[in-house]
Amino acid sequence: MPTFTLEESADGDAATPILPDGTVVVVEVTGVRERQMNYTDDNGNPVIRLGFEFVCIEGPHRGARFQQDVYWEFNTSARCRLYMWTLELFGVDHLDPNFRLDTDDLVGKRASAKLGIREWTRPNGDAGRRNTVKWLNRLPAGSGPVTAPVSAGSQSQPNFPAQNFPPLGRPGADEEPF
C-alpha cells in the first residue's frame, strides 16, 4: 500500500500569504531538488528544472515559504540564475574555472530575496497565484557566516546592501533571466 508524507504547499495559501511584488525578505535555502515539469520541450523530451525552496527567517513574514525553479544549467552568464544565486549565497564575486557545485552546499545559506508574483490558470480553470523569487542578494557583512568552497583569494570582500536590487553586472529587475 502506498504511503505519503504530507508536504507544505509551495503555491501560496493561508499559511503563506501572497506578498506584494517587489517585497524584499531575508530567506534561507531549505532545499534544492530536481523537478520534472508537466510539459515537454519541442522534441517531446521531459523538461527538468532545479527547484529552490526558501523560508523567510526575519521580520513580519517570518516562516513564509517560497519556491522558484531555475533552468538546469550552470555557466558564467549573468543571465544564468543558478550561477548568479550561487555567487550571492556564497558571498563571492566569481568562482574558479571548473568549479563543481553540489547543490546540497546551498542549503542553509541565507540571502535577501526580491519577490515577484506569478499568476496562471490551472487545468480546472481556477486561478493560481504565488510569490516568485526574482533575485537573491548577499547579506551585508557581519550578518552571519558565509562560507564558499572556493580557493583562497577568490572570496569577495565587498558586500552589496541587502536592499540594493539589482547589483551591477546583473540583469535589470524587470528582465527575466533564464
Image (cartoon, grey):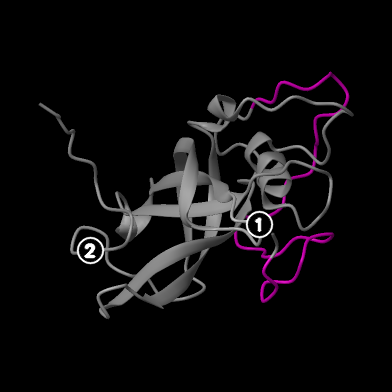
Disc 2 marks which residue?
A: 13
- Per the rendered image, the range of residues in magenta is 147-176
Q: Name the residue at 32% across, 58% down.
A: 61
Q: Name the residue at 52% across, 73% down.
A: 22
> Which SS class for mark 2?
loop
> Which SS class for mark 1?
loop
Foreground of the two, 122 or 45: 45
* 138 versus 125 height, above or below: above
Foreground of the two, 42 or 65: 42
Q: Is residue 106 left or right of residue 157?
A: left
Q: Name the residue at 22% across, 63% down.
A: 13
Rendered location of residue 55, percent (x, y) = 38, 46
Alpha carbon separation for disc pair 1 and 2: 35 Å
Disc 1 marks which residue?
A: 43
Task: Tell me the crowding category of disc 1: few under 14, some 14 to 19, or many 20 or more residues within 10 angstroms, Cα based.
Answer: few
Q: Name the residue at 67% across, 65% down.
A: 165
Q: Residue reaching furthest front?
A: 44
Task: Tell me the crowding category of disc 2: few under 14, some 14 to 19, or many 20 or more residues within 10 angstroms, Cα based.
Answer: few
User: Looking at the image, is mark 1 or mark 2 earlier in the sequence?
Assistant: 2
